[in-house]
Image: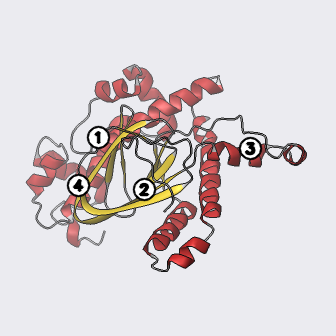
């Protein structure tokens, strides 16, 4: 619905309005490098991989990703059944205009209602935990896309829906300061940059549950020294990088165990554990049952 921008088409994004797009398929081969408008993207079912700039992210129905205007990205997904990916792409300057209307004094808005917004908007490019308001808006968009009555579609106030989505995104972004302030650096700018690097590392671990990741590898992704990275990660997420990634791999193993075709040995291999015995022991410590007993254990 609306304008969908593709940087490979030769068009310019400058004159485009807000738009939404849905893809339904069991597979999407990794795309060529694209340049994005400001977009919010989520997967209504299944899991989707993104390479945003030089960083890896993965989203599922419990999360979404934001990509800033002008950023390069690639994406891919595959599964055993049709997956649904949906995105909203915002008109250039739309975010700045909405933010200006929220933070500018009412008298100034009346005195100069057509003054161009001069405050750029940039979000943290990371996976965000899904919330009810954003999820509701996306399901409404999905319903509209499947609506066969074109007259009804034309009468619906899509711009109000897009504005509501962006206002919610701005609120989520503002509330991140509570997390940023968990870090102990004195300067806000330092805490903000450290938060950005740590979330990049966290998303990298989320995107690579198929292998064991060393501290050196993930701290390099964050562009931090290993000791600095471990200390700051614990401050922000209240767990160590090692513990966090083991838990993510165990969560992935539970998904694989739900597929009856997977043997314990296959699950162990697909989640990067060295041998079945260590995998079984860790699984039992975390979930109170063995992997073999898991599918019938009441989880």
Residue 51 appears in the picture as rendered: no
Q: Of label 4 and label 2, which has the lower sequence position?
A: 2
Identify the mark nearer the N-term, 4 or 1: 1
Where is residue 63 shown, x and y percent of the image? 44, 54
Nearest the viewer among 248 and 86 is 86
Whether residue 215 is situated above or below residue 3 in the rendered picture: above
Q: Which residue is mark 4?
A: 253
Mark 3 or 2: the one toward you: 3
For numbered disc 2, what is the local secondary structure? strand
Q: Is residue 213 left or right of residue 154?
A: left
Where residue 46 sits: x, y (%)?
A: 31, 61
- Could you tell me how far apart the alpha carbons at marks 3 and 2 are, in whole angstroms? 26 Å
Q: Give the labeled residue for mark 3.
A: 100
Cα–Cα span, label 4 and label 2: 23 Å
What residue does disc 1 label? Answer: 32
Horizontal and vertical percent position of residue 247 = 32, 48
Labels 1, 2: front one: 1
């Amino acid at each position: 619905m609306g304008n969908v921008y593709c940087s490979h088409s030769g068009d310019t994004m400058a004159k485009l309005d807000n738009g939404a797009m849905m893809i339904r398929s069991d597979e999407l081969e990794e795309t060529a490098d694209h340049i994005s408008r400001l977009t919010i993207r989520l997967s209504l079912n299944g899991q989707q991989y993104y390479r945003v700039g030089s960083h890896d992210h993965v989203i599922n129905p419990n999360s979404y990703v934001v990509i800033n205007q002008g950023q390069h990205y690639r994406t891919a997904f595959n599964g055993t059944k049709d997956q649904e990916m949906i995105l909203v792409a915002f008109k250039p300057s739309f975010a700045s205009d909405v933010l200006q209307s929220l933070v500018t004094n009412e008298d100034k808005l009346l005195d100069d209602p057509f003054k161009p917004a001069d405050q750029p908007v940039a979000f943290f490019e990371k996976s965000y935990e899904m919330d009810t308001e954003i999820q509701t808006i996306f399901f409404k968009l999905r319903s509209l896309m499947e609506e066969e009555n074109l007259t009804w579609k034309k009468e619906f106030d899509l711009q109000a829906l897009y504005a509501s989505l962006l206002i919610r995104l701005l609120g989520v972004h503002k509330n991140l300061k509570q997390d940023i302030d968990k870090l102990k650096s004195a300067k806000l700018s330092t805490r903000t940059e450290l938060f950005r690097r740590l979330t990049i590392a966290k998303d990298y671990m989320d995107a690579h549950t198929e292998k064991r990741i060393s501290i050196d590898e993930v701290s390099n992704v964050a562009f931090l020294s290993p000791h600095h990275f471990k200390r700051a990660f614990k401050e922000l997420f209240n767990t160590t990088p090692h513990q966090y990634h083991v838990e993510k791999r165990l969560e992935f193993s539970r998904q694989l165990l739900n597929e009856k075709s997977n043997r314990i040995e296959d699950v162990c291999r697909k989640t990067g554990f060295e041998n079945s015995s260590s995998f079984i022991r860790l699984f039992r410590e975390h979930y109170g049952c063995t992997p073999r007993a898991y599918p019938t254990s009441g989880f």
